[in-house]
Image: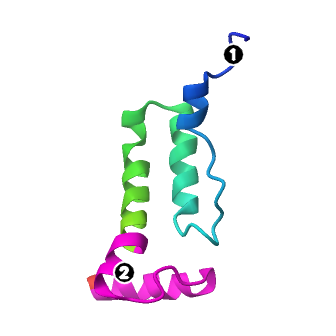
Amino acid sequence: MSVHSATKTERQNYSVSKLNYVKDPCFSENQIALQCLAVHHRAYCSVHQENYRVCRDFWKKRRRKRGETPYLPPPAEREEILRIHRQNSK
């Protein structure tokens, strides 16, 4: 194995998600956090990681807890749902 190769653990820790935006509404937030982690130290990327956690929490936990359906709407409807959520949060 060459010196520049990542170990198996490193590859698993920062592997690219096999999901896409259709199946994962937080795909772009996940990609930003992973790109940051690939270059910088974990503490430097805490803002990106927190943004991903908030996104995931909204789509997976809050909507189910409130009984809002569908839990994961189609991508075309997500922007409208987020806009309404932001207006109601103010």
Q: Percent x, y for residue 4? A: 69, 15
Q: Amino acid at mark 2?
A: Arg
Q: Quadrant of the N terminus?
A: top right
Other-residue count near label 1 (Cα within 10 Å), few / some / many at <14 / 14–19 / ≥20: few
Q: Please, is residue 37 above or below residue 79 in the view?
A: above
Q: Could you say which disc has been placed on residue 17 in the image?
A: none
Front residue of 64 and 6: 64
Q: Please, is residue 34 above or below residue 21 in the view?
A: above
Main secondary structure found in the magenta portion: helix
Label 2 belongs to which residue?
Answer: 63
Q: Is 77 colored magenta in this rendering?
A: yes
Q: Please, is residue 16 above or below residue 23 in the view?
A: above
Q: Percent x, y for residue 36? A: 52, 41
In what element is the residue under mark 2?
helix
Instruction: Identify the mark nearer the N-term, 2 or 1.
Output: 1
Q: Could you say which disc has been placed on residue 4 in the image?
A: 1
Q: Amino acid at mark 1?
A: His
The segment highlighted magenta reads 59-88
Residue located at (56% from left, 87% from top): 77
Residue located at (58% from left, 52% from top): 31
